[in-house]
Image: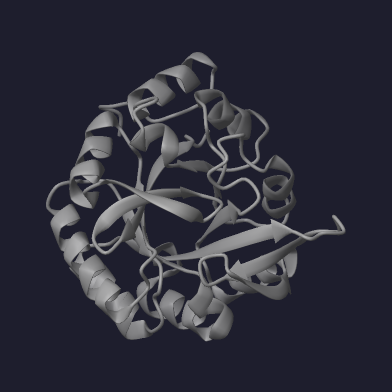
């Protein structure tokens, strides 16, 4: 049985970790390298860094973050946000990142996923998708530019596209749930998980340990990404894993291969 992964998420703006609600109201919560090391020592399976500055300067900042993080932690980490070219992908992977996540750029240039997967391997290419339920309740639309622009693209159609192009993993964020701490969007996760054969990372809405257990017990995702419960000290990664293990959910504990 595959173990479920716990992945702290660090949103980075101008070199600092920030957190908001529904993609707005950002507050600074710490240094990315120090937080990454803290979560690594607590037993995180992976870490995701999302550069929300998304400028050329941000690219340089994130390459520097990758180099510093790679010296401090020995688990896979992903960097995303504002990656626009094969050169950006190459720079971040060479700087120490194990994976890159592509969001807005992939919508504008889907071949970026295909080329990235062909050159670096599917395992290095994560398709990050921000989606929001349509007003008529008929499904979900994909958003880009940090959740500010509705592409009009149907979520399920886009998931089929990115997996066909070679994305090795899907990082799916519910904009409706993001930062609310009311729980993951299980309906949306189930809809996507039912049509893919690559790992799915649940993102958006985690507020309690119970929410993480719920997403795994309902078989909605392979990994749970969370920020608030870790950044604000509600729980450590170890506490989450201890709880999941008690619930009979398979997780990798410290010292296990």
Going by the image, does 63 lie left or right of 71?
Answer: right
- Colour mapping used in the image: one colour
**Residue toward you, 69 or 51:** 51
Q: Indicate the position of residue 124 as horizontal and vertical percent values.
A: 39, 65
Going by the image, does 115 lie left or right of 155?
Answer: left
Compared with 171, 160 (above or below) is below
Q: Indicate the position of residue 117 as horizontal and vertical percent values.
A: 45, 74
Going by the image, does 118 lie left or right of 185?
Answer: left
Compared with 167, 243 (above or below) is above
Q: Indicate the position of residue 156 as horizontal and vertical percent values.
A: 73, 64
Residue at left offset 46%, top offset 49%: 20
Residue at left offset 57%, top offset 54%: 173
Compared with 107, 186 (above or below) is above
Residue at left offset 23%, top offset 60%: 15
As drawn, which residue projects farthest toward the front? 25
As drawn, which residue projects farthest toward the top? 246
User: Number of numbered discs present?
Assistant: 0
Compared with 151, 50 (above or below) is above
Q: Indicate the position of residue 254 as horizontal and vertical percent values.
A: 28, 27
Residue at left offset 62%, top offset 29%: 214
Going by the image, does 179 lie left or right of 88?
Answer: right
Quadrant showing the C terminus: top left
Query: Splitting the image into 4 quarters, where does residue 252 fall?
Result: top left
**Residue toward you, 135 or 69:** 135
């Amino acid at each position: 049985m595959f173990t479920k992964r716990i992945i702290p998420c660090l949103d980075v703006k101008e070199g600092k970790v920030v957190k908001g609600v529904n993609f707005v109201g950002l507050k600074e919560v710490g240094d990315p390298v120090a937080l990454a090391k803290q979560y690594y020592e607590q037993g995180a399976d992976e870490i995701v860094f999302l550069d929300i500055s998304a400028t050329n300067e941000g690219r340089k900042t994130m390459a520097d973050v990758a180099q510093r993080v790679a010296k401090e932690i020995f688990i896979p980490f992903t960097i995303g946000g504002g990656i626009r070219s094969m050169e950006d992908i190459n720079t971040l992977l060479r700087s120490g990142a194990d994976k890159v996540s592509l969001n807005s750029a992939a919508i504008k240039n889907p071949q970026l996923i295909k080329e990235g997967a062909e050159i670096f391997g599917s395992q290095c290419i994560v398709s990050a998708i921000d989606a929001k339920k349509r007003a008529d309740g008929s499904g979900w639309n994909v958003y880009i530019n940090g959740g500010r622009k509705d592409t009009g693209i149907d979520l399920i159609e886009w998931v089929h596209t990115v997996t066909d192009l070679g994305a090795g993993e899907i990082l799916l964020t519910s904009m409706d749930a993001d930062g609310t701490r009311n729980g993951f969007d299980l309906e949306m996760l189930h809809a996507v998980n039912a049509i893919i054969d690559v790992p799915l990372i649940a993102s958006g809405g985690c507020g309690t340990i119970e929410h993480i257990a719920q997403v795994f017990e309902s078989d909605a995702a392979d990994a749970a990404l969370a920020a608030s419960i870790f950044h604000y000290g509600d729980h450590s990664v170890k506490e989450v894993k201890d709880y999941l293990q008690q619930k009979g959910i398979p997780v990798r504990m410290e010292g296990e291969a």
